[in-house]
Amino acid sequence: MSAITVSTTVNGDAVDFICQPDESLLDALRGRLGLTGAKEGCGTGDCGACSVTVNGRLVCSCLMLAAEAEGAEIGTVEGIAKGNALHPLQQSFLDHAGLQCGVCTPGILVAAKALLDRNPDPTDEEVRYWLAGNLCRCTGYDKIIRAVQSAAAQMRSA
């Protein structure tokens, strides 16, 4: 197979990388671009640990080919903070103990941000529905829901 050059935008920065035609976006982000926040939990799109946004849409990067990112705008957990300042979601996860082992946390943060970008005042049910594709085996979900709701309230008042 011959390599493919992909030109895309990741977290606001224009990037070019070379990948194999059958390489997943997750593998390209981690191996080629050094963005290791997205994790491979299952490799089948069932756990959400590899969640990123592509053109504003939440996707499992383990199921998308890197070549499909040509011309797209990709958002990863690394792009959520602004410099050294944590995003309100990140701080809220710390404040509400919404993380433990950390494998699922990057994907949940990306998914929660995508939700709050669309709906700044979600109900608990809407948060649970939106995050249903992100599995966590450590925390249970109550702390995660509280963290998302706390961040949403803070973002609305800012």
Image: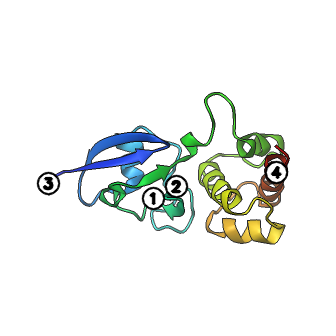
Question: Which kind of residue does numbered mark 2 sit on?
Answer: Val
Find disc 3 in the rendering and name its residue: 2
Distance (Cα) linking label 4 and label 3: 49 Å
**Which is more N-terminal, label 4 or label 2?**
2
**Which is more N-terminal, label 4 or label 1?**
1
Question: Which kind of residue does numbered mark 4 sit on?
Answer: Arg
Question: Which kind of residue does numbered mark 1 sit on?
Answer: Ser
Q: Which mark is residue 156?
A: 4
Find disc 1 in the rendering and name its residue: 61
**Which is more N-terminal, label 1 or label 2?**
2
Of all residues, the one furthest to the top in this rendering is 84
Q: Which mark is residue 52?
A: 2
Looking at the image, which is closer to me, 102 or 70? 70
Q: Which mark is residue 106?
A: none
Q: Please state which of the two labelled residues, at mark 4 or mark 3, is closer to the viewer.
A: 4
**Which quadrant holds residue 115?**
bottom right
Q: Position of residue 110 (x, y in %)?
A: 61, 53
